[in-house]
C-alpha cells in the first residue's frame, strides 16, 4: 500500500495514555487529568449556549473566550489565539513555522507529541537532552541549520521541573526562531513565562484548560503571543477550530478565579503527600511544580510495579525513554486515591515486586 505520504507510513503515530471505559472503576492517574469536577459556571455557560442553539457557526477566533482570558491574563484579546486543546496550538505552530526538511528542536525527555508533529510535517527534529538535574545547557539556544521552532514544556513532563523565566528569556534572545513555551501545567507552578511575551516577540506561551481547570474532555487551549505572531498563526488554523459550547465553557472557566485558586491549593497539598510517600518507599522523586510526579526507584524495576497497580485498578503512566531510562509518572489525584496508591505500592514492594 502506498497511498500515503511516505512520512505518514514511516511513523507509528502518537499514542496517548490509556482511557478505560467510563463504566470501569479505575483510579486514573496516568494522563494528569484533574480529579475534581470543573467550576459549576462551566456547565451553566454551556447550557446557556445550547439554549441559544447550535445553528450558527461560532466566532472563528473564539472572541468570547479571548475577551474573558484577556481580562484575567492582563493582555489585549488580539494577543490570544484559541485552540481545540493546546495540542491544536502545537500543531498550528508546527505547520506555521516548520517546512518540510526544516528543523524543530525539543528537550528530551519531554512531551512525546512534539516529535510526532515534526514527523507529520516531513520536518527534522532535534532532541537536546536535559542535564541530570533537569536543567538545559546552552546548546538548547544554539543556532542550527534549518532551525525554525523550539518547543519547551515548562513545567516539563515527565519531570514536573521548571526552567526559570529569566533563563527562558535568555534562550529566546539567542535563538534565531520562535520559542513556544508549553505551559500546560503552569497553574501548578511557582513561576510562568507569560510576562515575557511582551518583552520578546519570539516567545509564545501556550496553555490548556485540560489540566488545571478539569476540562480535558472539553478540548480547549490557547496561545499568547504578540499580535503580529497571532495574526499569522490564525491563518493556519481550521476556520472554526473551537466549537460554540467549548468557547462558552472555557470563557466561564477562566473567569472563575476562585475555583482555580481553591483547586490549585488542594492539588498542591496532595502533591506534597505524594512526593513524601514515594520518597518514604525509596523512590527518587523529583520536586514537582506540576500535577504529577516522576518517580524512579534505584533498585525496583518500574514496569512490574506499573503492572501490579494496574491489576489492582490503579492506572499510572509507565514511561520508558530510550537512552534515558524508565520510571512511573503519577498524576496527583484526590487524597484518598493517592493514599490507596501508596498503600498498594508498599504491599507490592513488600511482596517482592
Ligand atoms: C496535556 C498536555 C498538553 C495538551 O493538552 P490539551 O490541551 O489537552 O491538548 C500539551 N502539552 C503538554 C506538555 C501536556 O502535558
Image (cartoon, grey):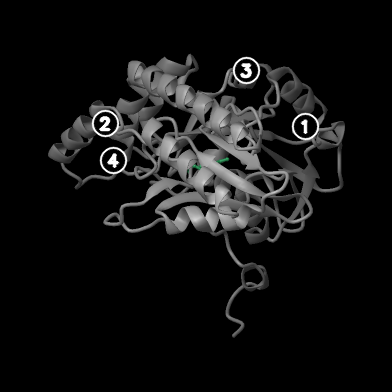
Q: Earlier in the sequence, mark 2 or mark 3?
A: 2
Say few, some or many: other residues with alpha carbon within 10 Å of mark 1 (under 14 / 14 to 19 / 20 or more). Answer: few
Considering only vertical position in the picture, is 193 above or below 306? above
Judge depth for marks 3 and 1 and give the one in front: 1
Tag 4–tag 3 contact (CB < 8 Å): no
- Considering the numbered disc 4 on the image, is that residue within a helix, a strand or a loop? helix
Residue 232 appears at what percent x and percent y?
A: 58, 38
Marking on residue 42 = 2
Residue occupying the far front of the picture:
351
Q: Relative to residue 265, is residue 224 drawn left or right? A: right
Quarter of the figure with the N terminus? bottom right
In whole angstroms, how far apart are the C-alphas of marks 4 and 3?
Answer: 29 Å
Judge depth for marks 4 and 1 and give the one in front: 1
Name which residue lies at 40% across and 15% down: 71
Q: Earlier in the sequence, mark 4 or mark 1?
A: 1
- Residue at mark 1: 133
Tag 3–tag 1 contact (CB < 8 Å): no
- Residue at mark 4: 244
Q: Earlier in the sequence, mark 4 or mark 3?
A: 3
Q: Would you say residue 224 is visible in this rendering?
A: no
Marking on residue 198 = 3
Q: Earlier in the sequence, mark 2 or mark 1?
A: 2
Amino acid at each position: 500500500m502506498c497511498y500515503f505520504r511516505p512520512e505518514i507510513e514511516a511513523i507509528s503515530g502518537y499514542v496517548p495514555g490509556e482511557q478505560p471505559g467510563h463504566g470501569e472503576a479505575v483510579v486514573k492517574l496516568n494522563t494528569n487529568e484533574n480529579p475534581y469536577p470543573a467550576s459549576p459556571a462551566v456547565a451553566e455557560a454551556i447550557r446557556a449556549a445550547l439554549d441559544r442553539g447550535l445553528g450558527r457557526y461560532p466566532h472563528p477566533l473564539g472572541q468570547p473566550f479571548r475577551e474573558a482570558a484577556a481580562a484575567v491574563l492582563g493582555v489585549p484579546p488580539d494577543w490570544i489565539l484559541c485552540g481545540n486543546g493546546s495540542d491544536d496550538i502545537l500543531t498550528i505552530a508546527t505547520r506555521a513555522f516548520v517546512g518540510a526538511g526544516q528543523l524543530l528542536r525539543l528537550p528530551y525527555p519531554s512531551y512525546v507529541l512534539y516529535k510526532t508533529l515534526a514527523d507529520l510535517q516531513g520536518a527534522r527534529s532535534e532532541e537536546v537532552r536535559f542535564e541530570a538535574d533537569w536543567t538545559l545547557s546552552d546548546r538548547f539556544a544554539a543556532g542550527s541549520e534549518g532551525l525554525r521552532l523550539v518547543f519547551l514544556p515548562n513545567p516539563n513532563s515527565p519531570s514536573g521541573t521548571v526552567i526559570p523565566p529569566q533563563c527562558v528569556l535568555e534562550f529566546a534572545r539567542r535563538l534565531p526562531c520562535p520559542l513556544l513555551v508549553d505551559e500546560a501545567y503552569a497553574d501548578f507552578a511557582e513561576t510562568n513565562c507569560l510576562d515575557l511575551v511582551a518583552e520578546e516577540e519570539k516567545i509564545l506561551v501556550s496553555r490548556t484548560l485540560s489540566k488545571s481547570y478539569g476540562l480535558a474532555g472539553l478540548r480547549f487551549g490557547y496561545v499568547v503571543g504578540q499580535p503580529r505572531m497571532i495574526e499569522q498563526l490564525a491563518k493556519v488554523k481550521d476556520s472554526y477550530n473551537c466549537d460554540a459550547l467549548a468557547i462558552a465553557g472555557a470563557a466561564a472557566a477562566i473567569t472563575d478565579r476562585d475555583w482555580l485558586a481553591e483547586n490549585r491549593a488542594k492539588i498542591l497539598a496532595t502533591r506534597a503527600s505524594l512526593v513524601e510517600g514515594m520518597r518514604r518507599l525509596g523512590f527518587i522523586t523529583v520536586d514537582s511544580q506540576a500535577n504529577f510526579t516522576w518517580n524512579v526507584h534505584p533498585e525496583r524495576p518500574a514496569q512490574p510495579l506499573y503492572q501490579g497497580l494496574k491489576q489492582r485498578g490503579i492506572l499510572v503512566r509507565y514511561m520508558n525513554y530510550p537512552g534515558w531510562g524508565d520510571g512511573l509518572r503519577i498524576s496527583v489525584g484526590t487524597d484518598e486515591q493517592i493514599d490507596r496508591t501508596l498503600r498498594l505500592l508498599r504491599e507490592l514492594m513488600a511482596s517482592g515486586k
